[in-house]
Amino acid sequence: MSATEEKEQAVSGQAEQGKEGGEQAAGRAEIKPTSTLSRAKLLKFLVLPLLVFGAGFVVNLFIGWVIFPRLLYSEKDQPIDFSHKIHVEAVEEGCESCHFFGEDGTFSGVPGAEKCAECHEERIGIHPEEAKLVEEYILPGKEIPWHIYARQPNCVYFSHAAHIKMAKLECVTCHGPVGESIHVKRYQQNRITGYSRDIWGWRISGIKTNSWDRMKMDDCADCHKKSGARNDCFVCHK
């Protein structure tokens, strides 16, 4: 092959390469609209639905956890504010000074006005809540209408003696650290069932992190199962 032919062949090869490069560049240029269209489709069919779902999830979460409980539960103030902490520190026998077992084994539960009168027959301080206790309940001989947080349905029989004296449970296991409180919390009552919110639990999600977070039948049955206690219906339902 002569030098002239080799030169012509080289020029021809370069021309073909240039043509192929131009076609590839044109191809890339033609892909751009398709790429833009793909992004638009991605935004339309993936991103936007996710945003709508996320917004709906947040709104429903707010309704379920914030608004719904306010509609489901009514709030009531206790007749008198009360500091467990002050009383536990002031009396000799602590909690058992007011919450005790009688000679027949029955549990006193929430103390009545007669028990309060043992220390508050007359005012011994300047606190307005004590004045209310003495003037509105003790002197007139009127019982204090406490709202009971742990009140169970009438079909349920619960023995404090069996759980405290026999099972050796602490009060805090079911009632929480009430002895450390300086005020009584507001009583919340389920508008449908009439039960205290303490029975169903304060977390609308139903998540339980402490033994005293709920007092539902499932919680009692679970505790019985773990401790080996009987779970027959008639044990709790009379």
Image: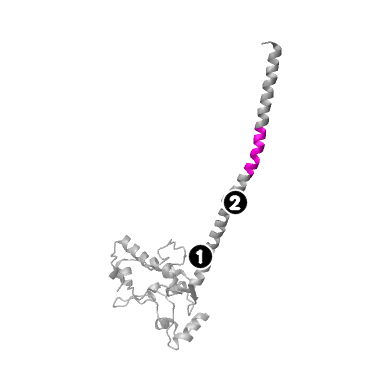
Which quadrant holds residue 97? bottom left
The magenta segment is 24-36
Crowd rating for badge 2 (residues with CA inside 10 Å; few <14, some 14–19, many 20+)? few
Taking depth in this image into account, of 203 and 35 the one nearest to the observer is 35
Q: Which residue is mark 2?
A: 44
Q: Which residue is mark 1?
A: 64
Quarter of the picture holding the N terminus: top right
User: Magenta stretch: residue 5 in it?
Assistant: no
Q: Position of residue 54 (x, y in %)?
A: 55, 56
Q: Residue at x 70, y 16 (%)?
A: 7
Q: Position of residue 173 (x, y in %)?
A: 38, 65
- Please identify the residue farthest to the top as the structure is shown: 2
Taking depth in this image into account, of 60 and 90 the one nearest to the observer is 60
Quarter of the picture holding the C terminus: bottom left
Taking depth in this image into account, of 50 and 215 the one nearest to the observer is 50
* 221, above or below 90, in the image: above
Q: Position of residue 45 (x, y in %)?
A: 57, 51
Please count the marks in the image. 2
Task: Kindly identify the amino acid type of the residue bearing the numbered disc 2.
Answer: Lys
Q: Residue at x 67, y 24 (%)?
A: 16
Say if residue 7 shows up in the picture.
yes
- Identify the disc placed on residue 184: none
In the drawing, does residue 228 fall left or right of residue 129?
left
Q: Residue at x 69, y 24 (%)?
A: 15
Crowd rating for badge 1 (residues with CA inside 10 Å; few <14, some 14–19, many 20+)? some
Taking depth in this image into account, of 106 and 47 the one nearest to the observer is 47
Q: Earlier in the sequence, mark 1 or mark 2?
A: 2
In the drawing, does residue 227 fall left or right of residue 142?
left
Q: Position of residue 129 (x, y in %)?
A: 50, 80
